[in-house]
Image (spheres, coloured by chain):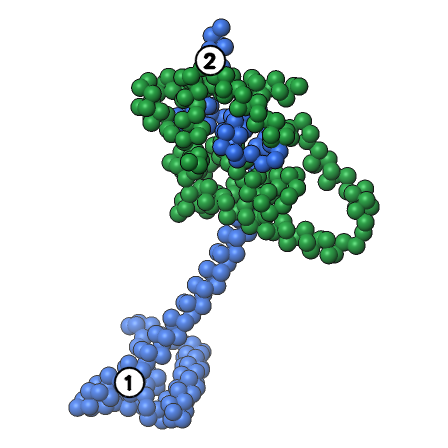
Chain colours: A blue, B green
Amino acid sequence: MHDKITAVNDEEILSANFDGEDLDKLHEVSEEDRRHLENWAAMGAALRGELADHADMGFADAVMSKIESGAQAEQPAAEPERKVHVLSLRKLGFIFGQVAAAASICMVTIFGYQAWNADDNAAGTQAVGTMGTIGGVNLASYQNHGGEAITLDAQPQLQQGVQLSPREQRDLAEKRQQEESRINNYLRGYVLDTASN
Amino acid sequence: MSPKAPDAGSSSDEELVRQVQAGNISAYNLLVVRYQHRVVKIAQKYVSDFADASDIAQEAFIKAYKALPNFRGESSFYTWLYRIVTNAAKNFLDSSSRQRSQVDVDDEVLNASSPEALTDRQTPDSIIESEELKKVILKAVGELPKELREAFMLRELEGLSYDEISEKAGVPIGTVRSRIFRARQYIESKMEQFRKG
């Protein structure tokens, strides 16, 4: 008897749910519930003249079965697709990051160098130092503050007590030579470029 | 006066949509039964065959379910669903006219080669002549005790909420809920008798 009462109450709540009432008490719809819902929907539709020439009393059942089977079929496939998407986004982000970092370094180098020149040119009154010869190339446009000539010919500042062997001195001189050559090549390119503009 | 369609664009639709979006599939079942007859009738304005109209309506409900996560409630659920149904019907007409122009075989051969298409539509038990069903329902409504009939008609024809019916009939909401449910139970029993023949 008690079970009977509970079942009736559940159906009564389902009837209220069907009317948009007590939706906070909406429970999972069973096959039996679906049959009731189909019948109740047909009653209202018949009264309002909404029935088509036929009434399919298994319509909602068919729709819900397709949705439920479709949802089950789609669920496992959805996850890997999302991972691929995330991976490709990460890859793109990494590439953009690298490009951005390289571009930033280039911009800082170029603008920093130009700003340094512009500062000295604008000052005017201050004595302008010309960088000395580096490896035989006259760097006319390569200026610096306070007239201090930058030269790689200066003896390296060695810590007190550090003695270099003749071989180490030769290596050091060779490395300096290479460094001079590298700087001059870079500056030669810059001077030619600015002269052509 | 034309009957007011219950719950077209009502807050209960919004609540059901919210529940579906939160993952409650039973809430979508309620939306399907609530609108299935109207949706089939819309589809039948485009195609004369009931089976085609039913297929279009099913497809529309499945599409709506899949698109529901993106539904933002800028229009009512029914207005949104209406657009989906009309688009599904137009697509159906386009594809069937293309098929007709592409397939150059006689109908008998075509039908014989695709038995699956036939079995999918063979649901004679669930499809009922609407005129007969309507007669059964109206007769049962006429047999209802006055207070049950009043509550049921106010809900189904006038689209009043339980609150409004309670106020109009001067009875508690619980009584309204019970009366509407008992009315449905009685009419349903008559429908079942009719279906069993």
- Read off the residue under disc 1: A117
Q: Which label's residue is closer to the chain start, 1 or 2?
A: 2
The number of numbered badges drawn on the structure is 2
Q: Characterize the local packing of mark 1: few (<14), some (14-19) or many (20 or more) Cα atoms within 10 angstroms.
A: some
Camera-nearest label, 1 or 2: 2
Q: Identify residue type, mark 2.
A: Thr
Q: Secondary structure at mark 1?
A: helix
Q: Residue at x 41, y 39 (%)?
A: B9
Q: Nearer the viewer, residue B188 or A75?
A: B188
Establish whether labels 1 and 2 are both on one chain.
yes
Tell me: residue B58, above or below residue A142. above
Which residue is depicted at the point 41% across and 89% down?
A: A193
Chain containing mark 2: A
* Residue A12 seen anywhere in this rendered image of the structure: no
Q: Position of residue B131 (x, y in %)?
A: 60, 30
Residue corresponding to mark 2 = A6
Q: Are marks 1 and 2 in contact (CB under 8 Å)?
A: no
